[in-house]
Image: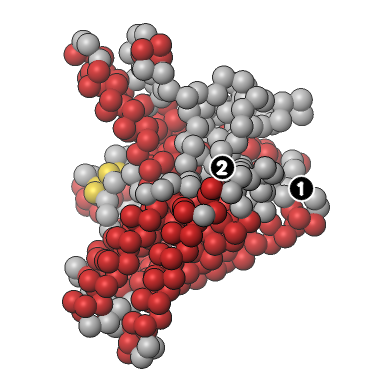
Amino acid sequence: MEEYGKILIIAMPIFLVLIVIEKAYGIYKKDDTAPLIDSVSSISSGITNSVKDVLGLSLTFLSYEWLVSKLAIYHLEANILSYLIAFFVIDFYGYWSHRFAHQINFLWNKHAIHHSSEEFNLACALRQPIASLVNLFTFLLIPAAIIGVPASVIAITLPLHLFLQFWYHTKHIKKMGFVEYVLVTPSHHRVHHAINPEYLDKNHSQIFIFWDKLFGTFQAELDNVPPVFGITRPAQTWNPIRINFQHLTLLIKDAWRAENWRDKLTIWFKPTGWRPENFEEKYPVNKIENVFDFNKYGTQNSQKLVYWSVAQVLITLLFVSYLFDNIAKIGLPNIFVYGFFILLTIYSYTELMDKSKYAIFWESLRLAVAIAIISYYGDWFGLNNVLPIGNYIILTYLSLSLLTTIYFVKIDFKIPQNQPINS
């Protein structure tokens, strides 16, 4: 928990700098692929996922340590060989868990957030789930357990493997020649994120592209079919917490409304998107039929809202950095109180990004929670030891944030926005 928090403190500014560089390059080339408000939503999603992981909010029914204790026929040391084996096995594990998430209805819920952006850029790589509360696929690591790869090696290699999937979420890098035959490239992954019929459910590999070629799910990017990004049932919100549970909500409703028990029970395990007979007519949901003829979500925003949203996510990153750097000092159960405040923060300002009138309620609740925390603990989780006026800074910021939210809801949102803002 604490170690992963330290890793993220190093990784977060690196990711942020690369996102800024991509944005600047896109502006320079007059091909900006990273609208600010979309990037804010993506970074916010990354924050929710990292907070969930650092707080350990997930269950593993079958632990890797247990697999090693029961299956190992040999025990490797933590050396270069064991790390290479671990990386290769984790990539195999990643391919299949990724493929299952695309092909099984209830598993899609935890993965839809990653595909929910209607753009394709480095920021959207950060759209990671909080809905993946249970790890069902540890058994895919059995090959490593049999060889006796230490659990400590797996624990280090897993986040490294995830971080290495960041770079290929971009439209600015075209096909890469020989590399296309070995590694997953931006071209391969553009196909994976596309909703064009030619591209759906292709290229599930995470580092080595040969898994798709071996198991029949490979598709090259076609020159005459430009990828269109998003999900076929568009999220239509910037709020990553709501996106995380949209598909699950639909499954629960469909299971409840289904008339026969077979449908109620099997809907969870059917192919992704399956619904009982006639449900598309009886209970229609918004679905993109023509990928070249639909309106992207949330393009009519004032510059003020866009820049305020950027400020909010940057301030939230400061809150998160303090949490990750002080996990041991804050301690249990206080880190869960802090985590709740972070999730509430993201819910609040992304509701404002959606132009919801309820943003005032969520912002008021956030201020009330902060007042309660400072009143109960005496300060902001020990911040006064570092910054004596920490309480005043936090309460001043939250009060100004509430006033700004009221301004947007009561005044700014009532001003017509005639031109799309794509800052």
Residue at the spot of label 1: 31
Residue at the spot of label 2: 298
Residue shown at 26% from the left, 66% from the top: 369
Q: Is residue 152 rendered to the left or right of residue 161?
A: left
One can see residue 31 in this view:
yes
- Image quarter hosting the N terminus: bottom left
Name the outermost residue toward the right.
29
Q: Position of residue 19 (x, y in %)?
A: 62, 59
Tell me the SS state at disc 1. Answer: loop
Residue 26 drawn above or below residue 110: below
Number of numbered discs visible in the structure rendering: 2
One can see residue 144 in this view:
no
Residue shown at 52% from the left, 27% from the top: 232
Residue 321 drawn above or below residue 345: below
Q: Is residue 52 rendered to the left or right of residue 228?
A: left
Q: Is residue 399 rendered to the left or right of residue 123?
A: left
Q: Position of residue 285 (x, y in %)?
A: 43, 23
Q: Amino acid at mark 2?
A: Gly
Q: Amino acid at mark 1?
A: Asp
The residues bearing labels 1 and 2 have C-alpha atoms spaced at a distance of 19 Å
Question: 149 or 324: which is nearer to us?
Answer: 324
